[in-house]
Amino acid sequence: MSKELITKKEFSDMVRVASHRLEKNAKFVNSLNVFPVPDGDTGTNMSLTIQSGFKAVNESESNHVGTLGKALAKGLLMGARGNSGVITSQIFRGFSKSIEDKDTLTAMDLAKAFDDGVKTAYKAVMKPVEGTILTVARFGAEAGMKKVESTNDILEVMKAVVEGSKVGLEKTPSLLPVLKEVGVVDSGGQGLVFIYEGFLEGLGGQTGDEEYIPDERDMTEMVNASHHQSVQGQFNTDEIKNGFCTEMMVKLGDNPSSDEKFDNETLRNYLDGIGDSLICVSDDEVVKVHVHTNYPYKVWAAGRKYGSLVKIKIDNMRLQHETIVDEDEPVTSEPANQEPVDYAVIAVSSGAGLTELFKSLGVTHVISGGQTMNPSTNDIVDAINKSNAKRALILPNNGNIIMAAKQAVDLVDIPVAIVASKTISQGMTAMLSFNPEAELEDNKENMEDSLDTVKSGQITQAIRDTEIDGLKITKGHYMGIVDGKILVDDEDIIDGTEKMLDKMIDEDSEVITILVGQDGNDADAQKIADYLDDKYSDLETEIHQGDQPVYPYLISVE
């Protein structure tokens, strides 16, 4: 069987089966998570992202494949969750732009769309890193472009894209040092392979019902990981040389300050010369820019050459790292139609106790994301819009939510700043520095300055045997994780927690807070507090009910 055209039916089938295939295999992708804890999220995030794209395609009444591609891109953008979901949305943003004028797709159209998607994704990511989902996408696109030179059969081209992406996936450990160290593949890349396999199955009339069940050897090789870092996980804050996060949206052709014809590449090259962490994307009507620079006025002057500045923003910013994550269906804890307010402070957390604690500290809106269920871009946009505020601060409390939060910032009309909190403890500490009378940029700076004053500890059970940084982890034992690094393995939860605390406490420590989760209890928490009183009598200890899942105890040391 051969196929030479993709019509609405084929395109819809591709997206539908891809969504279904990734949903069926999300659990396996989750198993490739950072640590052996029951909160793997990459598969869930990517699955929900592609489901949002399919919903948009399914709701479109157009028979024009280019229009369906645009719907797919919009759905993915609004539904993007986690770093891998956001990067996936960028791949298909470029894909859809490539086919926007096509009633149907040929093999060449399809191959070029994948190639354009890769180029868009690489440009969108602040510092592209090989050995990630980007590598998998690039290998797939290159294989598709090579295959189309010898055939006009769409099935053969799509098959080549799938095989190429698998080759890229196999190469991720050799390209990314942290993966090579433990011999594992990138989880986001594995998720993209499932999407591409779904495309092929949809084109071939299959349903994508098969669930990938790896054999014991596969699991040993792919899951025995000390750290599955994403693209964002490779950044070092010490590398940031430019102090201002500068953003602008230019309405092209609207009273430009010069006669120079707009060219995205020309603008991008100029901005790259005066800053870093650059994103510069455009369509026929607007150009959006995000760049870290010491010269914001030069950025705005460059944009003004091509049209009017309909939106500008400047603040200080730190690059983020991907960490372990949250659960439950994301919803805001506030109803719509709030009274007008000056500030909205929006925090992400999971657990009724944590929600009440955040509100007691001055948070106005809580998005419940929870383990394995990061909020989408649209969830964050909704929270901002429903706040009816003049300006907003976002506390992600998780590095894996940063990219979705950044996309949300571009989709709202009020000034929004993201405070770089990576844990619940950091989010609560940051709120102690919030001043409702201060300017947005001043609050962001002051709140971020406080993040380094707290150490974050987490206690949870290991779901498999492994070895991480020389530490042997036993399935069923309790792990003590401090600021993203596993430091303790113990069969007893109290002993393990006490050992973790010993590693967290130093001469500068003053206050210790214990947050009791769904699987913790007040009696054990009090035993831990008694241990602290006996050994560190000069420190103050507090116990609060957090109700968080997965982690019986979250502990902060300030």
Image (cartoon, grey):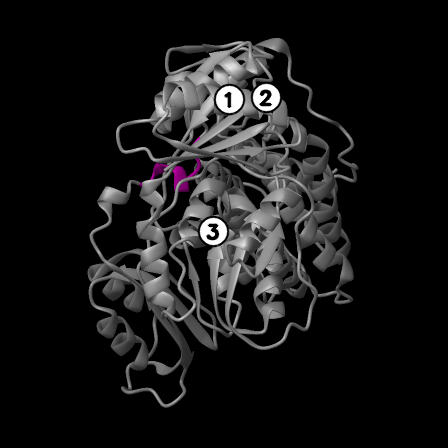
Q: Amino acid under label 2?
A: Asp
Q: Which mark is residue 403?
A: 3
In terms of secondary structure, where does tag 3 sit? helix
Q: Residue at x 71, y 37 (%)?
A: 23
Q: Position of residue 272 (x, y in %)?
A: 25, 59
Q: Residue at x 78, y 66 (%)?
A: 61
Q: Which residue is mark 1?
A: 528
State the quadrant of the C terminus: top left
Work out which quarter of the rendered image holds the N terminus and state it.
top right
Quarter of the rendering containing residue 294? bottom left
Earlier sequence position, callout 1 versus callout 3 = 3
Residue type pointed to by label 1:
Ile
Q: Residues within 10 Å of mark 1 (few under 14, many from 20)?
A: many
The percent coordinates of residue 208 (x first, y second) are 75, 35
Q: Is residue 216 shown left or right of residue 427?
A: right
Classify 10 Å Cα crowding around label 3: few (below 14), some (14-19), many (20 and above): many
Give the residue at mark 2: 524
Element type at marker 1?
helix
Dividing the picture into quadrants, the one containing residue 521 is top right
Q: Please tell me whether residue 536 is drawn above or below residue 234 in the rendered image.
A: above
Q: Position of residue 203 (x, y in %)?
A: 72, 43
Q: How far apart are labels 1 and 3 at the CA level?
A: 36 Å
Q: Give the label, 3 or 2, closer to the camera.
A: 2
| x, y percent for residue 501 | 41, 23
Whether residues under marks 1 and 2 lie with C-beta atoms below 8 angstroms apart, the answer is yes
Residue 413's tag is none
Nearer the observer, 253 or 337: 337
Question: Residue at (54%, 37%) from the top-left corner?
Answer: 325
Mark 1 and mark 3 in contact? Answer it, CB < 8 Å.
no
111 lies above or below 99: above
Q: Amino acid at mark 3?
A: Met
